[in-house]
Amino acid sequence: MLRAIKTEAGYRAALKRIDRLMDAESGTPAGHELEVLAILVEKYEREVFPMAPPSPIDAIRFRMEQKGYTQADLGRLLNSRSRASEIMSGSIKRLSIAAIRGLHDEWHIPADILIRDAA
């Protein structure tokens, strides 16, 4: 019987059951059980192991790595090589509104991450 996962032991048991059901076909009773267990495990993990959002600098570095952008690309976006250098070195506390807009509009970095303090 499936029920909410509320303890570490329940979590471990659910993970073991998921391992056994990994080859279950979609649409079968085992496939339905696997789907529900995955949802329950995800909910437990979100509650017990919350992830803090990245800092603005980490988000910028991640996007640069994803897209193959360089510090020069960041400088062109911001119209300032020195500002790009300050951002990449982590020597700033907050991004300007213009930088936030550019990074959000051009590089599609979520604005809610960019408006946070860098430190």
Image: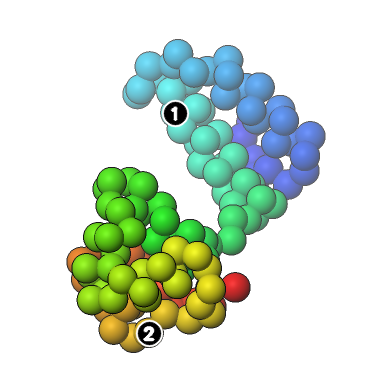
Could you say which is closer to the camera, residue 41 or residue 70? 70
- Residue lying farthest to the front in this orientation: 82
Q: Which residue is mark 1?
A: 32
- Residue lying farthest to the bottom in this orientation: 97
- Residue 113 appears in which quarter of the rendering? bottom left
Tell me the crowding category of disc 1: few under 14, some 14 to 19, or many 20 or more residues within 10 angstroms, Cα based. Answer: some
Q: CA distance from mark 1 to mark 2?
A: 49 Å
Q: Position of residue 8 (x, y in %)?
A: 77, 39
Mark 1 or mark 2: name the one nearer the start of the chain: 1
Q: Amino acid at mark 1?
A: His
**Residue under the point 63% across and 47% down:** 44
**Residue under the point 41% across and 52% down:** 62
Q: Is residue 48 left or right of residue 34?
A: right
Q: Helix, strand, or loop for circle 2?
A: loop
Residue 96 is tagged as: 2
In this orientation, does residue 55 appear? Answer: yes
38 versus 72 height, above or below:
above
Q: Amino acid at mark 2?
A: Ser
25 versus 117 height, above or below:
above
Q: Helix, strand, or loop for circle 1?
A: helix
- Residue 18 appears in which quarter of the rendering? top right
Q: Position of residue 96 (x, y in %)?
A: 37, 84
Q: Is residue 76 left or right of residue 49?
A: left
- Residue 4 appears in which quarter of the rendering? top right
Check the picture and name the quadrant holding the C terminus: bottom right
